[in-house]
Image (cartoon, rainbow, N blue to C red):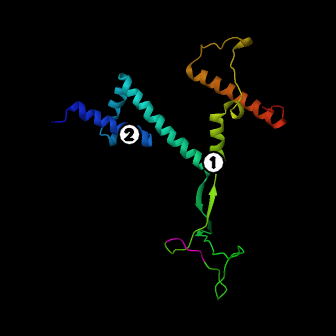
Amino acid sequence: MATTSVQLLAAKHDIFFAQLARHGRITQAAAEATLDRSAAYKTKDSDPAFAARWSEALDAYADTLEAAAHQRAVEGTKKPLTHQGQFTYVYQTGPDGRPIKDDDGNYVLALDENGKPKVAFVREYSDSLLLAMLKAKRKREYGDSSKVELTGADGGPVKVEESPIEIARTIAFALALGLREKALQAEDGSDLA
């Protein structure tokens, strides 16, 4: 039985979504599935089932990212310990926990399962990832509670009679003032939220 063009396209879509879920890069997923990237976007815009699979694939990739962030933030990652560009090695220790010396007075290196000297590792954690995860999960306790409200003259609505560039400048200026005020409050301790 011959493969139809519909079956071939369905198989390409399966590959596209599998790759998108794996690495989250649309251009690469389309290339791996031999799909035209712009055609994939057009299909997404016109086919709700295709759009739903696209969203599910990106959600699966986001889960992968969240797991990696959790690993780095909570469980940490092992990093080889170095000194002046050279690995630091682990020494054998005796029952008292002290490093063992050989007959010449040199410390004896601990060996791994392949008979090679064991490299010392440190576990590093990412405080910034931990804080980002807390902010995402506990917005009330860890989120940014500042608000910036823009009003026009005498507290009325902002009039939109200016060019888009002028509007952007006005908004940027107002935001800068709000951030400056928040920073000043934080410095003098008046904003404890």
Secondary structure found at label 2: helix
> Residue 70, relative to residue 9: is it above or below?
below
Give the residue at x 74% y 11%: 154
Determine if the magenta segment contains residue 111. yes
The disc placed on residue 136 is: none
Residue holding disc 1: 74
- Boundaries of the magenta span: 109-113
* Left or right position of 40 against 87: left
> Residue 129, relative to residue 94: is it above or below?
above
Q: Position of residue 163 (x, y in %)?
A: 56, 18
Secondary structure found at label 1: helix
Residue holding disc 2: 18
Q: Position of residue 116 (x, y in %)?
A: 52, 74
Name the foreground residue: 42 vs 150.
42
| Residue that extends furthest to the left in the rendered view of this protein | 1
Name the foreground residue: 185 vs 10.
10
Q: Amino acid at mark 2?
A: Ala
* Left or right position of 141 against 53: right
Give the residue at x 66% y 79%: 100
| Rendering quarter of residue 117 | bottom right
Q: Amino acid at mark 1?
A: Val
Give the residue at x 84% y 35%: 188
* Left or right position of 1 against 114: left
What main secondary structure does the magenta stretch of the protein show? loop
Q: Residues within 10 Å of mark 2 (few under 14, many from 20)?
A: many
Q: How many marks?
A: 2
Give the residue at x 19% y 35%: 3
The answer to whether any part of residue 35 appears in the image is: no
| Residue that extends furthest to the bottom in the rendered view of this protein | 103
- Rendered-image quadrant of the N terminus: top left
Name the foreground residue: 142 vs 26.
142
